[in-house]
Image (spheres, grey):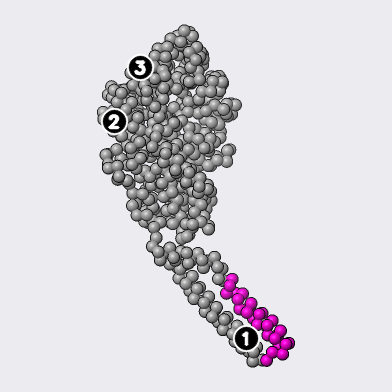
Amino acid sequence: MEGRSRRGSAGSRSAMVLLFSCFLCAASQPFIGVNYGEVADNLPPPAVTAKLLQSTSVSKLRLYGANAAVIQAFANTPISLVIATSNGDIPSLAGDPNAAAAWVAANVLSYYPASAISTISVGNEVLLYGDANLAAQLLPAMQNLRAALAAQSLVDKIKVSTVHPMSVLVQSDPPSSGTFDPAHADQLRGILGFLQQTGSPFMINPYPFFAYRSDPRPETLAFCLFQPNQGRFDAGSQKLYTNMFDAQVDAVRSAMNREGFAGVDIVVAETGWPYRGDPDEVGVSVDNAKAYNGGLVAHLRSLAGTPLMPGKSVDTYLFALYDENLKPGPTSERSFGLYRPSDQAMVYDAGLAKSSQSQGQVTPSPAPASKKPAGWCVPKTGVSDSQLQANLDYACAQPGVDCSAIQPDGACYNPNTVASHASYAMNMLYQAAGRHPYNCDFRQTATVTSKNPSTASFPSVLKRWWLGWLRETRLHCVASWHTAALAVVTCVVGARDLRKGMPWLYYSALVTLLYFVDLSLTAFLILMWCLFVYSFLES
């Protein structure tokens, strides 16, 4: 990014985005979902979970099976459901249309439409396991399930898809180079053709956490956590990426486009960040989990989309609703939960609760409805200009942040310092992202204050107006030509009057008057130049 690059969106557009965001914060959002894993022995009753989700902005729930109690608990709620077959069900579903019809009867017809089932996922990450026989049966199983839905006139209501890991890509960096693994190419082409024909989405599990684990550099962490960073430029698409989530999703988009399936939508079936892990696991902490999930939620709410799919947020299911305490593997595998199963309190605030959004709260602790967090993000003292410049460039590149006011001739251009411009841009991002403290971190170079930094006393406002007026009057030009103009006028008038026989006394009086005016104007200009210099030094 060159110099003080700033986003050139119009102020009215930014205002509209911020206004629309206020309405989004008060209601469920169609692009935010959550995964409900059940590999645990301490989960609350499904009815409690249904009540919990209705207090949040989550509008979608993805199950890894078709638990009847859970499906029934969400009857007559605004939460839509993704249900799933197990991988073990695939051979029978593929080989026997009657088995598919029976599955639909037992797991869909028994609950729909009271329970808003939107999608059936056939298995989960089937291509990950290297079972060629199972992979070959995936598409026939999907086709038979759709035929069973068609027999019940439900194909326009319920989609059929399957979920893939990011490992189906053999190339993903840069995003424009995204390419499917040739080992899975035939299966994926068949599946994508089915999805395109039926209007169903391609479901994928991007995890920036795993990308960071394989490249644990500080700049990679910032890129993964939606924190200030220099971005990564994709020369193939000429797009700048400021976060790993967009880069991974667009890599999938590029791979699909390369195969000729640009019209198939993408759904992020899983993404998340663990808040706890083993001592040898990098990047696992509450702060990082909060930064990732909170940053992702704010990014989705901005409606910015990705560089290759701008203007629309990808439907995204966060992983996960609760920890799953019976999962094998490292501690991180059991530490992705957003809520504690014991009391349904937030493990950390990712900005999902309707109450915390509408009241501006940033912790799960109860607080009076009238109490709001401090409202302005400003740089800390002692931060270097280079770091402030990086913050400025990052903030102005984010969706919903309008930095036109700190462009030359903008209302907030003066004082023209990196600190002043960075403060403006950082606060704009903080406001646009929902005023969460983690949006005012900037690698610990910023802080939230209750004092409005833009508030100025009348003398300072008058001084800024005076300084601007002096600059606009171009006094240096006036000072250089006014004397010459008076001399020309004097000579012309004097020559004309002398030809008419006017007395020399009259001419002398005219010259004296004109030069008295010249002297007065010169003194006035000197005074204003002194004030100009004083104002400039004070600013």
Q: Who's the residue at 34% across and 35% down the image?
A: 353
Q: Which residues are magenta?
A: 477-503
Q: Earlier in the sequence, mark 1 or mark 3?
A: 3
Task: Say which of 234 and 61 sits in front.
Answer: 61
Determine which residue is flagged by label 1. 510
> What's the distance in space between the residues labelled 2 and 1, CA to CA?
92 Å
Q: Residues within 10 Å of mark 1 (few under 14, many from 20)?
A: some
Figure check: 174 above or below 427: above
Q: Is residue 273 above or below residue 479?
A: above
Is the residue marked by circle 3 packed among few (<14), some (14-19), or many (20+) residues within 10 Å?
A: some
Residue at image point 33% right, 32% down: 55
Q: Position of residue 440 (x, y in %)?
A: 38, 47
Check if mark 3's residue and mark 2's residue have beta carbons within 8 Å: no
Mark 3 vs mark 2, CA separation in Å = 21 Å
Q: Is residue 454 above or below residue 84?
A: below
Q: Which residue is mark 2?
A: 344
Disc 1, SS:
helix
Of the two numbered discs 2 and 1 in the rendering, the one whose residue sits closer to the viewer: 1
User: Pointer 3: what residue?
Assistant: 68
Q: For numbered disc 3, what is the local secondary structure? A: helix
Where residue 38 sits in the image (x, y, percent)?
34, 22
Marks 3 and 2, the one that precedes in the sequence: 3
Looking at the rendered structure, the kind of residue marked 1 is Leu
**Residue at the image position 46 percent from the left and 59 percent from the top:** 417
Whether tag 1 and tag 3 are in contact, CB under 8 A, the answer is: no
Residue, far right? 499
Q: Residues within 10 Å of mark 2 (few under 14, many from 20)?
A: some
Q: Position of residue 338 (x, y in %)?
A: 34, 32
Q: x and y percent of residue 275 in the render? A: 33, 35
Q: Quadrant of the C terminus?
A: bottom left
